[in-house]
Every structure is written in C-alpha cells, then in structure tokens.
Image (cartoon, rainbow, N blue to C red):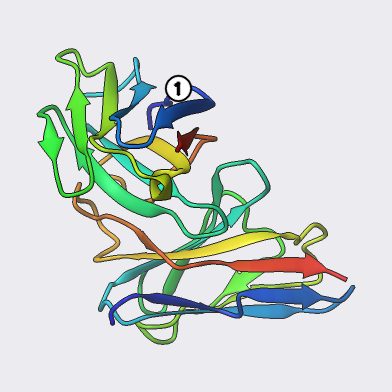
Amino acid sequence: DGGITQSPKYLFRKEGQNVTLSCEQNLNHDAMYWYRQDPGQGLRLIYYSQIVNDFQKGDIAEGYSVSREKKESFPLTVTSAQKNPTAFYLCASSIHGLAGAKNIQYFGAGTRLSVL
Amino acid sequence: DAKTTQPPSMDCAEGRAANLPCNHSTISGNEYVYWYRQIHSQGPQYIIHGLKNNETNEMASLIITEDRKSSTLILPHATLRDTAVYYCIVRVAENYGQNFVFGPGTRLSVLP
C-alpha cells in the first residue's frame, strides 16, 4: 500500500537527549514536511523539503534538525536545545514542492513524543 | 495567506447532513479553499478543495459563495466515524513555502 509511515508511534525522551523521528513515504512525492501539534491546537510547520538534499526552516525550527538524503525519507531530530518537545509530530508529503492547487499534502499517523 | 474563521464545535445527528461553515472574508483571487479533517490522535486527512466553483467528491461537497468570502463543507450523510476536527484552509496556489496553516478548526460530533 502506498502511504506515509511514521515511527515510532510513541517516543520518550530523557533530559539532554536527542531523539530522531522517522518518516518514510513510497508515494514518489518530491516534497516532505514536518509539523508539530500541541493539545487542542492547530499544526505548526517545523521544516520542509521541496527536493532531495534541500530543506528550509518553517515557523518553529529552533531545537530541531532534519536531513533529506533520499527522496523517500525525511527524519526529524529533536535536539536537547528544544526545551518543550512534548507534542504530536506529523510528517506530510506532496507531489512536488512547487506551486499548484492540486499539490495536496498527505499526512502520516504521527509520533507522540513525551519527556521523561 | 488569508485567515479563516470557523465555529469551535458543532453537533450533527447520525444520517443527517453536516454543514460546516468557514468564513474567509479577506481571500484573494488566487487563493484556494482546502478542507482537511483530523480524527483523534491521527494525521489530518485531505477532504476536498476548490477555487470558485462548487466541488463534489466521494467524501463531501464544497459550496463556495459567489463573492468567495465564505464556504460550506457538506457531509451528506454523517456517520459516527465522521466525528473529527475539520479544518478550513485558504492558501495561495503559487506558494513556494508550501505551508498549510492549520487553525483550531471545528470539532464535529456526530451523535447516534
């Protein structure tokens, strides 16, 4: 089945620890995105990548890092510099990163990160 | 991108049509209206989008007023599985930042 796979579903981070959230897609989409969602709120963009080996900061990039070495994969690292990492993290992809009304974003099931 | 206003919550009886409104009074001529929904603890799901004409697909219908300042998402026969938060997003097609701005949305409760 085609889709976006996020893992793990639940993740716990200790103080001072970096953790990496996985996002893989087999939709052959060029663009990928990471969002953060806090309880009862909308989504906020962390990073996005329009093409392999390129990525841009979103609205709340501080304390996060990403890489885009393969088209299928866009891992997100939550670093120790992110002081309030507890949230629901969502990965999305779209056909291509450039303009187009049909450039719909499709989302994974999310990873819920908590701090121990 | 234009901002949208949605009611925080709505109820709908199972089997009836659910009509979810969205105001986007500052929409520009090149901005599309998108609808997504998010079932609890899952990722958002794309429903439908449109520019100025009404649209229909297997999930829903989208009615956009002639002046494009508001729209309504219609779920023709709501089921319990349609209980979710529904997001109305207005966005420029030619947006290289590709950021969908999700606000708080409308929490739809379908009641048996």
In this orientation, does residue B12 appear? yes
Name the side, left or right, on which A3 lies relative to A57: left
Out of B84 and B68, give the one closest to the viewer.
B84
Could you tell me residue A105's position as x and y percent?
33, 57
Viewport quadrant of the C terminus of chain A: bottom right
Say above or below: B63 vs A3: above
Could you tell me residue B66's position as x and y percent?
14, 14
Q: Residue furthest bottom?
A: A70
Residue occupying image coordinates x 42% and y 46%: B80
Residue occupying image coordinates x 19% and y 50%: A100
Could you tell me residue B16's position as x and y percent?
30, 30
Out of B106 and A103, give the one closest to the viewer.
B106
Question: On the image, which quarter does residue A11 sit in?
Answer: bottom right
Could you tell me residue B86's position as x and y percent?
42, 39
Residue picked out by circle 1: B5
Name the side, left or right, on which B104 lies relative to A29: right
